[in-house]
Image (tube, rainbow, N blue to C red):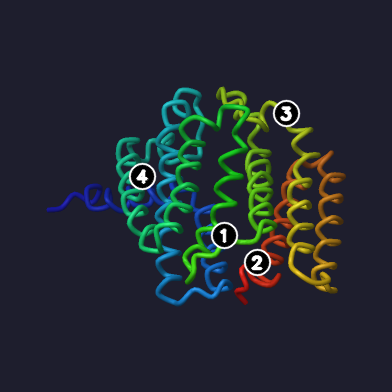
Amino acid sequence: MVNPEQSTAPAREVSALAGSCHPGPLVVVTALTAALAVTAGQEPGRCLLTTGAVLTGQLSIGWCNDAFDARRDIATGRRGKPVADGAIEPGKVWTAAWAALALCVPLSFACGWAAGAAHLTAVAAAWAYDLRLKATRWSWAPYAVAFAALPAFVTLGLPGRPWPAWWVLSAGALLGVGAHLGNVLPDIRGDLATGVRGWPQRLGPDRVRLLLPVPLVAASALLALGPAGPPGARRTAALAGAGLVAMTGAVLGRRRERAAFAAAVAVAVLDVALLLSGGGLGTGAS
């Protein structure tokens, strides 16, 4: 007879791997890139390649993060991660991370050499964050590079290999910095307890809460005012809304830290909407 525990072990490992890949950011980044590919005018087959490359890249990044942090998480008693909770061995998560990275490389270059180089630059920046830069004052830099590289990956995969407009690249970098601050804000105190001293941790939660809206609203301004011609009512309203939401979050965040984070997410959603509806990526794509 088959032992019930043995029969369910593979399912538990699959579930643990799914929890270790940071599914929230994975879904958001992959879906955003797919939407950008469609907006830029990529053909369906190229859209699938672009999405597959980003999906495997994000899987490798998430698994690398959890596998590398496993020893510190276990030593400090940090819970909430499958590896730290003992649901899966770190070695298996490392294997999954390297396997996903091995798939990411050919999928990226299948979109073109220039596009592949742009995407693998983003993936390399994220791995550098996981392995070293997360605990340094340069922790913001991988986010800026990776978020700016994603629209470049999309447009360089188009015929003629055009680059996105400068304001798209700049807005992407600013969104990356904002994403870093927002992602770290709720966990700053816990990170400090586990020895992680990146840029936000060095600033402290109060300063991060006040700084968080700045890069996001700056990205809103670039996305609203960057495209040729007057911004129009829709982009003007989105920019005004981003500023209002950011200010509200900064005020409410004095009492509830989560309010500042929620406001940052709302501004980021407005920024993404501007990016997707603001006349393509500055390459002439509709």
- Of the 4 image quadrants, the one containing the C terminus is bottom right
The residue at which mark 1 appears reads as 151
Amino acid tagged 4: Ala
The residue at which mark 2 appears reads as 282
Horizontal side of 209 relative to 61 (left or right) equals right
- Disc 4 is placed on an element classified as helix
Task: Give the label, 1 or 3, closer to the camera.
Answer: 1
- Disc 3 is placed on an element classified as helix
| Closer-to-camera residue (166/22) | 166
Residue 194 appears at what percent x and percent y? 55, 24
Mark 2: few, some, or many residues within 10 Å (few <14, many ≥20)?
many
Horizontal side of 54 relative to 258 (left or right) equals left
Among numbered discs 2 and 1, the one appearing first in the sequence: 1
- Disc 1 is placed on an element classified as helix
Residue shown at 32%/54% (left/top)? 103
Mark 3: few, some, or many residues within 10 Å (few <14, many ≥20)?
some
Marks 2 and 3 sit apart, C-alpha to C-alpha, by 35 Å
Q: Residue furthest left?
A: 1
Amino acid tagged 2: Gly
Residue shown at 50%/39% (left/top)? 80
Residue 120 appears at what percent x and percent y? 44, 49
Mark 1: few, some, or many residues within 10 Å (few <14, many ≥20)?
many
Horizontal side of 158 relative to 174 (left or right) equals left
The residue at which mark 3 appears reads as 203
Task: Give the label, 1 or 4, closer to the camera.
Answer: 1
Residue 262 appears at what percent x and percent y? 73, 51
Asked if residue 88 is positioned above or below residue 100 in the image, the reply reads: above
Residue 175 appears at what percent x and percent y? 67, 51
Mark 4: few, some, or many residues within 10 Å (few <14, many ≥20)?
many
- Disc 2 is placed on an element classified as loop
The residue at which mark 4 appears reads as 97
